């Protein structure tokens, strides 16, 4: 068969003249762009500086149509932000490099957060619980002293002079004796290893006592609890005998506020289907409890949470509507002079508006898994993140890095599994993310990719992680672009 060469696409390289840069124009520096809405678009450089312009400006920048005289202000802003340069390599390129290193300096000291799942026992039966919960057989579901010791030893091996030791469950306070044992041993070793340790207990507060609070106060231990909203939401989500989880949590928060420092207790909410209809009531509950912030979180779509789809499964866009309504409500308070912030927005705003690193484990590139967080499970298994052990509880051991009985520090943190995960930890090299304008504000989450899409690379067009972050980042920039007052509110949140 004869194929006409005329019908083939022309694959010939263009002449070098085509690619040469006219000397009278400028050079493009690396930047990415995103359409915010039909009127506005944002350009973001390698270190996260952003500029918002009318739609069509990016095409003009790329087409070398920005005129130094006619568009003098725009031209100056693009030069100052190193979006364009008058020489192939700008004179201040080292400044850009330093700023890039600063943004990534959360990596300098390696792992900070060491999670100890001190027990799997719990007296709650929350329908979105990510892990199994067991009320009996203490020996089988509490972390053994041998494993606590080994976990502490590994934590002391971390190159990071500042480490956080977080006790999780189940309900961690059911194993309070083991927590005390772990804290006392860590205190002794921290002196010889010259480590500053922050202690955190994650607790539903149902079994808190004055004795426990006094111990927390003495040792500067922080408490992190769950508060899903007013009683009719919290008690639906977080079941326990007597259906009084809300009452116990609120009483526990009050007790804690009276005994330990006010800032020593924080709360997290998880949005279920029921929550999505009540954004205002949830924000009001946090204000009523004396908190000056709230962290609006969707449910983690894996583990046992999936076994109750009616209560826990919803479209990410439904969460985003909930999130925006709550955020608008919060902003309105701030505009009236009351300081109250949303924590996820605050994390992203720090990335957008400051040159500093933000070491939030769920929104980092490289991902927070291993580099920032490690988890020692009650049974001695070691996992890359908290979410990894949730997967393991439903039989998926993809992110198991080793065992406290047998694995060395090197085998856990630099072993074969850790290296495989490391390949997909940087969004700079992930398909979709590598061209995304919001890359420096976002992160990568191999555990989420694996759990929701079946492979650790993930597929951005259908990723709920991507959908959530892209829309929240776009929305925050759009809000700042539309209102100087809101920009001032956001600036107050990051100070
Ligand atoms: S996950 Fe989505 S929003 Fe985040 S960097 Fe990747 S493409 Fe951008």
Image (cartoon, rainbow, N blue to C red):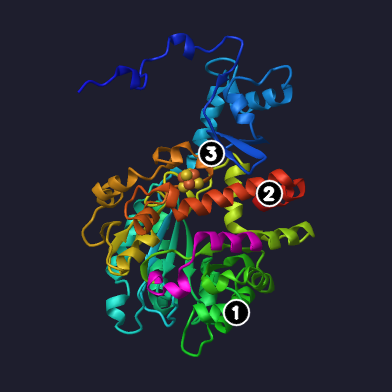
Q: Residues within 10 Å of mark 2 (few under 14, many from 20)?
A: some
**Could you tell me how far apart the alpha carbons at marks 1 and 3 are, in whole angstroms?**
42 Å
How far from the left and from the top, in percent, is residue 96?
55, 28
Looking at the picture, how far across and down is residue 160, in whole percent? 42, 48
Q: CA distance from mark 1 to mark 2?
A: 34 Å
Count numbered badges in the picture.
3
Q: Pick whichever of labels 3 and 2 is earlier in the sequence.
A: 3
Q: Quadrant of the N terminus?
A: top left
Region in magenta: 305-326
Task: Say which residue label 1 marks.
Answer: 250
- Determine which of the numbered discs, if any, sits on residue 479 in the image: 2
Viewer-nearest of discs 1 and 3: 3
Q: Which residue is mark 3?
A: 437
**Residue 167, position in %: x, y?**
42, 67
311, above or below 489, in the image? below
- Marks 3 and 1: in contact by CB < 8 Å? no
Name the quadrant containing residue 27.
Answer: top right
């Amino acid at each position: 068969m004869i194929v006409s060469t005329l019908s083939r696409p022309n694959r010939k390289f263009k002449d070098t003249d085509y690619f040469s840069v006219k000397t009278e124009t400028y050079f493009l520096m690396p930047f990415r762009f995103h359409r915010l809405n039909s009127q506005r678009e944002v350009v973001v450089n390698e270190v996260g500086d952003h500029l918002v312009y009318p739609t069509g400006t990016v095409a003009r920048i790329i087409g070398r149509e920005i005129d130094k005289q006619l568009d003098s202000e725009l031209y100056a802003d693009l030069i100052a932000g190193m979006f364009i340069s008058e020489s192939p390599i700008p004179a201040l390129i080292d400044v850009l490099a330093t700023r890039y290193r600063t943004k990534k300096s959360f990596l300098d000291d390696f792992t900070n957060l060491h999670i100890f799942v001190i027990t799997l026992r719990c007296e709650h039966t929350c329908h979105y619980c990510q892990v199994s919960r067991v009320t009996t057989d203490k020996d089988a579901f509490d972390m053994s002293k041998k494993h606590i010791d080994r976990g502490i030893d590994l934590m002391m091996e971390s190159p990071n002079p500042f480490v956080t030791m977080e006790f999780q469950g189940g309900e961690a306070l059911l194993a309070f004796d083991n927590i005390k044992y772990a804290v006392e041993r860590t205190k002794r070793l921290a002196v010889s290893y010259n480590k500053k340790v922050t202690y955190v207990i994650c607790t539903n507060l149902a079994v808190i006592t004055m004795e426990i609070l006094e111990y927390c106060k003495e040792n500067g231990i922080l408490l992190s609890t769950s508060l899903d909203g007013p009683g009719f939401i919290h008690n639906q989500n977080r079941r326990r005998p007597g259906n009084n989880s809300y009452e116990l949590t609120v009483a526990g928060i009050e007790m804690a506020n009276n005994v330990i420092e006010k800032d020593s207790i924080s709360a997290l909410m998880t949005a279920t289907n029921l929550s999505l209809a009540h954004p205002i009531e949830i924000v009001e509950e946090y204000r009523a409890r004396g908190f000056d912030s709230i962290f609006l979180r969707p449910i983690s779509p894996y583990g046992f949470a999936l076994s109750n789809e009616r209560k826990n499964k919803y479209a990410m866009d439904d969460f985003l509507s909930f999130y925006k309504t709550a955020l608008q409500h919060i902003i309105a308070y701030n505009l009236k002079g009351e300081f109250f912030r949303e924590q996820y927005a605050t994390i992203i705003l720090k990335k957008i508006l400051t040159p500093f690193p933000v070491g939030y484990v769920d929104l980092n590139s490289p991902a927070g898994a291993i580099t920032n967080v490690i988890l020692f499970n009650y049974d001695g298994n070691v996992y890359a993140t908290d979410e990894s052990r949730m997967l393991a509880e439903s039989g998926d051991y993809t992110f198991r890095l080793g065992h406290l009985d047998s694995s060395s520090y090197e085998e856990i943190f630099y072993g074969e599994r850790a290296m495989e995960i490391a390949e997909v930890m940087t969004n700079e090299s992930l398909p979709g993310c590598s061209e995304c304008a919001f890359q420096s504000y976002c992160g990568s989450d191999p555990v989420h990719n694996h759990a929701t899409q079946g492979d650790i690379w993930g597929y951005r067009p259908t990723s709920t992680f991507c959908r959530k972050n892209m829309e929240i980042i776009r929305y925050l920039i759009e809000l700042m672009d539309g209102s100087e007052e809101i920009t001032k509110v956001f600036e107050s949140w990051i100070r």
